[in-house]
Amino acid sequence: MKVDYLTPQTSQTKSTRPLEAQNLSSSNCQPWPGLIETYRSYLPVNETTPIITLLEGNTPLIPVPYISQQIGRGVKVLVKYDGLNPTGSFKDRGMTMAISKASENGAKAVICASTGNTSAAAAAYARRGNMRAFVIIPDGYVALGKLAQALLYGAEVIAVEGNFDDALTIVREMAENYPVTLVNSINPYRLEGQKTAAFEVVDVLGNAPDWLCIPVGNAGNISAYWMGFCQYHTLGKCDRLPKMMGFQAAGAAPFISGQPIPSPETLATAIRIGNPANWDKAWGVKEASLGEFNAVTDTEILEAYRLLASQEGIFCEPASAASVAGLLKVKDQVPSEATVVCVLTGNGLKDPDCAINHSNNQVKSGIKPELSVVAKAMGF
Ligand code: F0G
């Protein structure tokens, strides 16, 4: 049949072939309905909750053979690439829940402090839910992509001359005194949404991994994963629980020093946090899972960041690479034959400056557009 590409398709001109004939039968092409619909029975929503969704979740769990090989002894490493969520980070999981519940409760505006990803997610979901989004960020310490997102989604962005911890103190007080709902991870609905990442890991592996390696900033995500694993374990969906291995950047590692860090510093700006709001919860997770907190230096983070991209074809943001950097740092402790999942929390496109400034690769420029010159530049 000849296709007329110039006439707009109307309902009359659309294919009337049955789905089966188009090889799109419901058995092999189920549209993903978003994480709230998928895991509705495990989440605090009811029929009257308006579901504000961008069809987040269902992110791939990708085997990383080069990294597995670096560890050896039959250890299998996979990455949960949550940078493939709609706004490019795991925050979408928490935000679909937090914004849906805010909407159910009649909120007209939400607020968060953010190192960037929370602000992008809050902005996107709030606008979709027809609410104002106020985001308070540490001036000069938010990666370009994240700032671009918050602005374009229409958030009201306020940059304070302080760090994330200062911004969080302000938004807590704002939410107490003004009609704005707080959507940082102290909002319990955030963790409810984020725990679905653990469900997805178990749904794919058929069990919990032996280890879960995860970057730690405000310590919400490690707490959420643990909630998810425990809930599935109680329901008999997995018969073990992972050792939770949390990694902080060395310049922002309060869990290693045992006390808040007044001036945290790291190139992994997403986890540049000195006083995690979920301190007690995360510490409880470490104890209950017989896990550990460790610090990784910026140099180690950058090595893992480059390695993920150049050996595995996976571009994550620097904070995310802390999970892999940490695993490689403590690789001798991993039991033989273990299955390890490293969480890659954010997309590499969030922070193009870091990629360009810290790549070992460079553009060959000043090349004339002539076949012989280009071929020579290619080494032929
Ligand atoms: N990875 C990325 C890419 C993040 O953006 C964050 C936190 C974390 C890891 C740490 O997760 O806070 O749950 O321990 N970003 C927050 C933000 C603080 O404002 O976007 P956590």
Image (tube, rainbow, N blue to C red):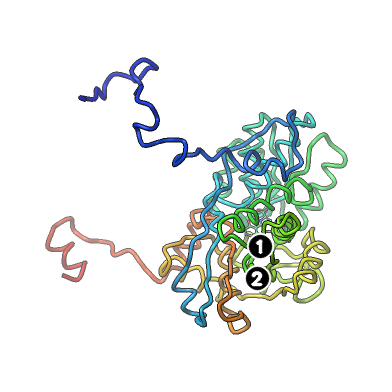
As drawn, the label of residue 316 is none
**Residue 65 pos. (x, y %):** 45, 71
* Residue type, numbered disc 1: Ile
Label placed on residue 271: 1
| Circles 1 and 2 in contact, beta carbons < 8 Å | yes
Q: Which residue is rendered at x = 50% and y = 68% of the image?
A: 305
Residue extending farthest bottom: 332
* 3D distance between C-alphas at marks 1 and 2: 7 Å
Compare residues 41 and 259 and report the one nearer the observer: 41
Residue 293 placement: quadrant: bottom right
| Figure check: 123 above or below 242 | above
Q: Please give the name of the residue rendered at 56% of the width and 45% of the height, measured from the top-left corner.
A: 87
SS class, disc 1: helix
What x and y, as percent, mark residue 149? 56, 44
In percent of the image, x 61 and y 76: which residue is there? Answer: 297
Assess disc 2: are there few (<14), some (14-19) or many (≥20) residues with their C-alpha within 10 Å of its C-alpha: many
In percent of width and height, residue 300 lies at 56, 76
Image quadrant in which the C terminus is located: bottom left
In the depicted view, which residue is nearer to us: 339 or 191? 339
Q: Residues within 10 Å of mark 1 (few under 14, many from 20)?
A: many
Query: Residue 376 occupies which quadrant of the picture?
Result: bottom left
